[in-house]
Image: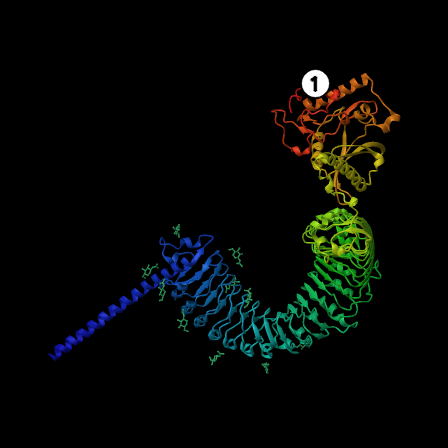
Amino acid sequence: MEPQNNISNAFCSSLLLFSMNLLFLQHVSTATHLGNETDRLALLEFKHQVVNYRDGTLNSWNDSLPHCQWQGVTCSYRHQRVTALNLRGHGLVGSISPHIGNLTFLRFIDLRNNSFNGEIPQEVGRLFRLRHLNLTNNAIGGAIPVNLSRCSELRIIELATNNLVGKIPPEMGSLNKLVTLFLRANNLTGSIPHSVGNLSSLEQITVTFNNLEGSLPIQLGQLKRLTYLSIGVNHFSGMVPQTLYNISTITSFSVGENLLKGSLPANIGLTLPRLQVLGIGANQFSGTIPYSITNVSELQVLDLPENNVKGPVPNNLGDLKNLRILNVGINLLGTNTSQDLSFITSLTNCSNLQRLDLDGNNFGGELPNSIGNFSHQLTELGLGRNQISGIIPQDSKDLPTCTIPSNLGKLQRLQQLLLYGNRLSGQIPPSLGNLSQMYSLFLAINRLEGNIPSSIGNCQNLQMLELSQNRLTGIIPKDVMSFSSLSKHLNLSQNSLNGSLPQEVGKLRNINTLDISNNKLSGEIPGTIGDCSSLEYLNMQGNLFEGTIPLTLASLKGIQHLDLSGNNMSGEIPKDLGSLRFLQYLNLSFNELEGEVPTKGVFKNASAISVVGNTKLCGGILELNLPPCPTNVKKHGRPKAFKIGIIVGSVVLFSMLMMSFGALCFWRKERTRFSSGNLIGSGSFGSVYKGSLQQGKERLVAVKVLELEKSGASKSFAAECRALRNIRHRNLVKILSYCSSIDSKGNEFKALVYEFMENGSLDSWLHPEIVEVNTLRTLNLLQRLNIAIDVSSALHYLHNHCETPVIHCDLKPSNILLDNDLTAHVGDFGLARLHSGKTNDILQQQNSSIGVKGSIGYAAPGMILSYFVLDLDHRYVSFS
Ligand SMILES: *[C@@H]1O[C@H](CO)[C@@H](O)[C@H](O)[C@H]1NC(C)=O
Ligand SMILES: *[C@@H]1O[C@H](CO)[C@@H](O)[C@H](O)[C@H]1NC(C)=O
Ligand SMILES: *[C@@H]1O[C@H](CO)[C@@H](O)[C@H](O)[C@H]1NC(C)=O
Ligand SMILES: *[C@@H]1O[C@H](CO)[C@@H](O)[C@H](O)[C@H]1NC(C)=O
Ligand SMILES: *[C@@H]1O[C@H](CO)[C@@H](O)[C@H](O)[C@H]1NC(C)=O
Ligand SMILES: *[C@@H]1O[C@H](CO)[C@@H](O)[C@H](O)[C@H]1NC(C)=O
Ligand SMILES: *[C@@H]1O[C@H](CO)[C@@H](O)[C@H](O)[C@H]1NC(C)=O
Ligand SMILES: *[C@@H]1O[C@H](CO)[C@@H](O)[C@H](O)[C@H]1NC(C)=O
Ligand SMILES: *[C@@H]1O[C@H](CO)[C@@H](O)[C@H](O)[C@H]1NC(C)=O
Ligand SMILES: *[C@@H]1O[C@H](CO)[C@@H](O)[C@H](O)[C@H]1NC(C)=O
């Protein structure tokens, strides 16, 4: 039985072997099958966690297609396993499912530029084949998962611009194939782990814009392949390890905005020969700028501002042919001697120079005229807050005393020129007006003299103009006020400018800060200032301004700081200043203001306002300690005794009288250009003056100035323009012109200019006033009949012969004007309406607020003439 047994044993073994093989084979195929099913399920889970997708990318992830053909999914050819997930920039919102860890064949994940939130699941640690993980620009929070360090094949980790918190896991030091580690713009804390030195393949690391702290590990110096080191805007402190300066492969070394100390090694140019960017700004570096830096021929950016670097700037910086940015501002460079700026000339060799910033150092001496030979790429030139002075040899003959080289005008691309806080004297070269790209020009705090060149008005992109604290004289050129671009600030304070503030100030619609204080400016403050609708800070103190405070100041809705102190302003304080919601500081002290101090808004707060030194003010809040106002000063006072019902009527009448009187006074005061002697009449919306036009032969005209304060006046103006636009008849008053603009106080001004009618209105003939007694005039019957015919023919024309019938609506003797041979002309179309002609409806171009009188078919009561006329044309009488 043994052999049999053996045989059977052998048979059994082979059978076993066979079936094992069979089993094994079966196992393999099941594994593959199960594997791709696992992937499918994991992808569906991934989809499940994405709560919103903009472009429907994940709609394709359905059963109608095998998952390897789903959008963004890549599978391996042989095993049909998912190897890459590429879903960048699809607007995906949601969290990353932990089931992603089941996609064990994944090598490449790119979810950048979506809106993933939640955390990176620890399960990514199961992706042991992962090489490339890009989650840049999402909203992922939580910590960097420690298990990520188990993905030992990782080459690229990019997690920049997310909300990651916590520490950089020291375990990541094991990723010895890692080339790129980008963690920029998160909220990581802690320090850079020492294990970073074990990332022996690392070439690029950035942790800029985090909350990292501590000292930089000396182990960074072990990264022999490092080219890109960017750790700026953190709280790193202590010395920069000298070993870092020994990594000769580095091209970009940026450590700005930390608390780092130390000095640049003297041989940096030899140890870091490939540097393109050296940025150490806003730290506590000391020492000098190493001369060897000029050996780094590829250097493009030398950015050392806000440190304690001292000594001279190497004279041969111009050897750095590729230099684009040289920023050494706010250091201790220079020795306030004439040699300090000698390096500038060599910089003219740097044909790519875009920015030169030497601001806030101790550079003395003169500004070499070679500055004009700088690269025409230069956009920013900052030399402010130094000791620069002296007269410079000019190549321009016309400005012998100018210490700002007029050559600067050649730098066409210059956008920023900062020369403030030096000792520059002489005049501002007009050639600066050639710098049409300029957006900030700072020449403040120097000894500049002469006029402000009006050519500066050519700098149409200027947003900030700072000329304060110089010795400038002359007027403010109106061109300087003409840029609407000037959006940030204009400061001309502390000079000796005279003349008035140009009307054009109103064009500074975008300006935020306007300071013209402490000059010798005089005249009235133009009302156009109310158009500077973005103003937040306005300082006019210490000038010789006079006249009243423009009411238009109350339209500066965003104003926070308003100072008119130390001028000769008179009149009352406009009450409306109290309605400026953001006003926190109002200084009206030391003027000649009078009347009542308002009590609303800013006037409620004694610490926010100052009105001292105005002897004629009264009222206001108690803290101001002003005398009470005499009651009759109150214009709008409503004495309680008058509350008795019986005399309400007379109060109304009285106040109407007062108001019209007040309006007249106000109006007389405001419109000084038309003297009251020339007043020839007044109507509902304005007054009519006699005037003359001098174009060749003198021609008399009547000018109707609308009182726009009255509601409806603007509409009346529009109605009149519309009505008279297309009509012409011998019995209509001819309109010669109109004006619609802003007057010298900034008030809206609208006027109509008519032919002058020597014989005045029919009303003045029918109802002569006492004053006209000595020129008493009467009309005989024939004249009256002729006038009636004139008026009726005018109306006939208006009603029947205009393209769109015009209905006067306010026909009365005072609107019928007589010329020198007593021919009647119908005037005042302020209430006129255009009639559609087809139906009875009126074109609703006006609303009824215009005035109760303006109704169709209206004619002044008792005006026989009008009835007569209207009878001829009774078609329109029947309306109303
Ligand atoms: C899964 O693998 C099996 C076996 O290799 C194959 O037949 C099937 O098509 C794969 N499924 C997908 C969705 O790729
Ligand atoms: C992923 O793997 C885990 C652990 O093996 C398992 O529990 C889970 O069900 C898997 N997910 C899917 C979607 O298959
Ligand atoms: C499933 O995907 C296919 C193409 O990938 C698509 O045409 C179809 O509309 C999808 N089905 C649904 C229900 O979204
Ligand atoms: C991010 O995605 C949006 C929309 O998909 C796109 O407009 C934007 O240019 C992308 N940004 C980057 C940096 O890819
Ligand atoms: C993370 O890694 C640890 C081993 O370091 C392991 O025990 C744990 O299961 C992993 N966690 C996940 C969620 O994969
Ligand atoms: C990762 O995404 C960022 C942001 O879109 C991109 O700049 C970067 O090149 C990507 N990295 C790789 C290796 O593709
Ligand atoms: C960053 O974290 C700090 C505290 O760790 C927190 O105060 C700060 O608000 C966070 N900043 C952002 C942008 O999340
Ligand atoms: C770096 O790696 C070496 C060997 O691979 C190991 O001994 C050492 O502990 C690691 N250092 C850190 C800080 O992880
Ligand atoms: C820098 O490298 C040189 C030679 O490669 C070496 O002599 C020197 O000690 C190194 N300096 C530092 C601080 O590591
Ligand atoms: C550095 O440059 C200077 C001249 O600027 C030159 O004399 C010197 O040889 C250079 N050094 C090296 C190491 O190239």
Res. 57 in view: yes
- Dot 1 amino acid type: Asp
Q: Quadrant of residue 345?
A: bottom right
Q: Quadrant of ligand 9?
A: bottom right
Q: Residue at x 79, y 41 (%)?
A: 666
Q: In the picture, which quadrant includes the C terminus?
A: top right
Residue with the mark numbered 1: 871
Residue 457 versus residue 320: which sits nearer the camera?
457
Q: Is residue 758 left or right of residue 809?
A: right
Where residue 519 sits: x, y (%)?
82, 57
Q: Quadrant of residue 45?
A: bottom left
Secondary-structure class at tag 1:
helix
In the image, residue 133 above or below residue 288:
above
Where residue 670 sits: x, y (%)?
79, 42
Q: Is mark 1 within 8 Å of ligand 4?
A: no
Q: In the picture, which quadrant includes the N terminus?
A: bottom left
Res. 638 in view: no
Outermost residue, right side: 774
10 Å crowding of disc 1: few (<14), some (14-19), many (20+):
few
